Amino acid sequence: MNRCSICKTLIRPPEPTIICSECDSGYHEECWERNGGCATYGCSNVPVVKRTLQPAVIERAWGDEKECPDCHRSIPSSVLSCRCGARFPWADPMTPAQYHAWVDEEAQRVRNRRLFIILFILSLFGWPAPVLGIIAGVQAFRSREVMAGENGPFLALAFGTFIIGLIYSLIFLLISLEF
């Protein structure tokens, strides 16, 4: 299974797909049509973007504000951060519950990324690899939904650590059988 180069989700077999004739990137048919072609930088099938002149002064319209879900200040609706330090994954207004859930998930992603990197590096030393591989495999399996998408390489790193642990386990087993 491949990931769509536009929406970054898995392309599952029954879904209609398009493969770019120039760069061989895979896309959902719907993503290809919405984008107007390929999304790979430098590919000749990338749609041509027409430049438009921006107005010299942009005036905000009535109702063009939202409330920061963290400090409850009124902020422009298009901003992705507030003066209080809060940052948001999208410009649409969020409820405080949505915001805090997103912040918790983001913190979990950061912790998992750090953990997976540390476990991988330590597993390269050999002797701790079997135990670290089990820890990485269990944690990767438990957090696979949270780490999907743009954090996929870190998830792959964790599963790689698991495989390194299995390989070292087999090596240690073979060495112990010879003695």
Image (cartoon, rainbow, N blue to C red):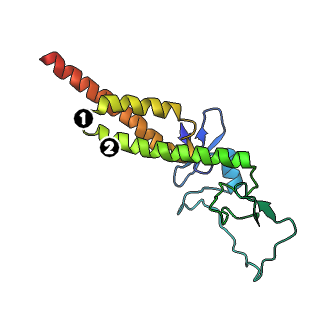
- Asked if residue 4 can be seen in this view, the reply is no
Counting from the top left corner in percent of width and height, residue 151 is at 51, 46
| Dot placed on the residue nearer the N-terminal end, 1 or 2 | 2
Residue 167's quadrant in the figure? Answer: top left
Left or right of 92: which side holds 167?
left
Q: How many marks?
A: 2
Q: Nearer the viewer, residue 52 or 66?
A: 66
CA neighbours of label 2 inside 10 A, class few (<14), some (14 to 19), many (20+): few
The residue labelled by disc 2 is: 121
- Asked if residue 129 can be seen in this view, the reply is yes
Which kind of residue does numbered mark 1 sit on?
Gly
Residue 126's quadrant in the figure? Answer: top left
Q: Nearer the viewer, residue 80 or 68?
A: 68
Q: Nearer the viewer, residue 101 or 33?
A: 101
| 14 over 83 or under it: above or below | above
Give the Cα separation between the discs numbered 1 and 2: 10 Å
Left or right of 2: which side holds 91?
right
Counting from the top left corner in percent of width and height, residue 24 is at 52, 49
Residue 74's quadrant in the figure? Answer: bottom right
Residue at the left extreme of this rendering: 179
| 151 over 145 or under it: above or below | below
| 160 over 92 or under it: above or below | above
Q: Please give the name of the residue rendered at 52% of the width and 31% of the height, measured from the top-left corner.
A: 142
Q: SS of the residue at dot 1?
A: loop
Q: Please give the name of the residue rendered at 23% of the width and 20% of the height, measured from the top-left corner.
A: 173
Q: Please give the name of the residue rendered at 70% of the width and 51% of the height, measured from the top-left corner.
A: 33
CA neighbours of label 1 inside 10 A, class few (<14), some (14 to 19), many (20+): some
Which kind of residue does numbered mark 2 sit on?
Ile
Name the mark on residue 78: none
The residue labelled by disc 1 is: 126
| 147 over 133 or under it: above or below | below
Counting from the top left corner in percent of width and height, residue 176 is at 17, 19
